[in-house]
Amino acid sequence: MTKLNKVLSLIILVLLLVSCSKETKANFTLTGTIKGLKKGVVYLQKDGDSSIVDLDSMIINGKPNFSLQTNIEEPVLLYLKLFKNDGEEHYIPFFAAEGVTELNTTLKNFNFDANIKGASQQDLLNEYTQVMSRFNDKNLNLMQANFLAQKENDSLALDSIIRASNRLIKTKYSYTIQFAINNKDSEVAPYLALYEMPNANPVYIDSIYNNLTDDIKASLYGKRLSEVIKQN
């Protein structure tokens, strides 16, 4: 083989390695728009062992569009973080899977206006959070009623509000448990058991785990749930 052929072969090999490296690093893309944002920095993040890990970032200067990329091994909860130099950190959590997820929101209501389209796991999480928002609205009404009852020193009203609040908590937990069991073939099920019902009876947590499919038990959140059950 001539020197020229060796050099060409080496160049082709390097290009192939670079190409493969790029493919490995970018099996997930988050695209979207933050309406009203002129300047700032957006980050794609995930939970690390002891802290939040930055996966990608982009400076926004003029146009509110963004595109962030990373490599993920399986469906996992990621975060879109916005830094806009106001002394606060703004996050939007979402489930990511291989492919493209689109996230559109506004600067004014960064969290509440988030519209997320992508992974099937995120569709399920959207369905769950919509119901949870109704529970949260009821809880807010009870908190306001509790404040007024305390102000007026109305013990009968306070007792009634406490009973209503306890019923709401039980209903919320019951819905979460049933939702997780009904979606036993999704990573969302063990995720909810881990992070949405920290004070639930261990019997219910066991029930969710035992109903998971084998694939979901072997997933990131399935393994974490198994570890929590063993520790308890």
Image (tube, rainbow, N blue to C red):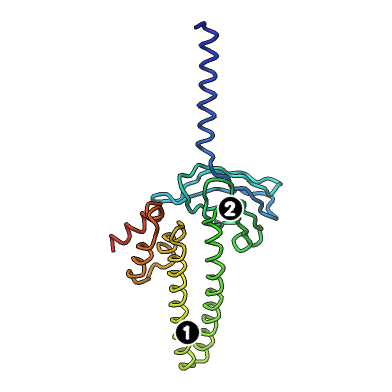
Q: Which of 152 and 42 is in front in this view?
A: 42
Percent position of residue 229, x then y: 31, 62
Marks 2 and 1, how far apart in space? Answer: 37 Å
Q: Can you tell which of label 2 and label 1 is closer to the viewer?
A: 2
Q: Quadrant of the C terminus?
A: bottom left
Residue 112, picture quadrant: bottom right
Percent position of residue 29, x then y: 58, 45
Amino acid bearing label 1: Ala
Q: Name the residue under label 1.
A: 164
Q: Nearer the viewer, residue 215 or 189?
A: 215
Residues at circles 2 and 1 in contact by the CB criterion of under 8 Å: no
Q: Is residue 5 left or right of residue 65?
A: left
Q: Which residue is drawn at 66% across and 61% down?
A: 108
Q: Is residue 5 left or right of residue 231?
A: right
Regarding mark 2 in the picture, which secondary structure is present there? loop
Q: Which of 228 and 65 is in front in this view?
A: 228
Q: Name the residue under label 2.
A: 118
Q: Nearer the viewer, residue 109 or 11?
A: 11
Q: Which residue is drawn at 44% across and 89% down?
A: 159
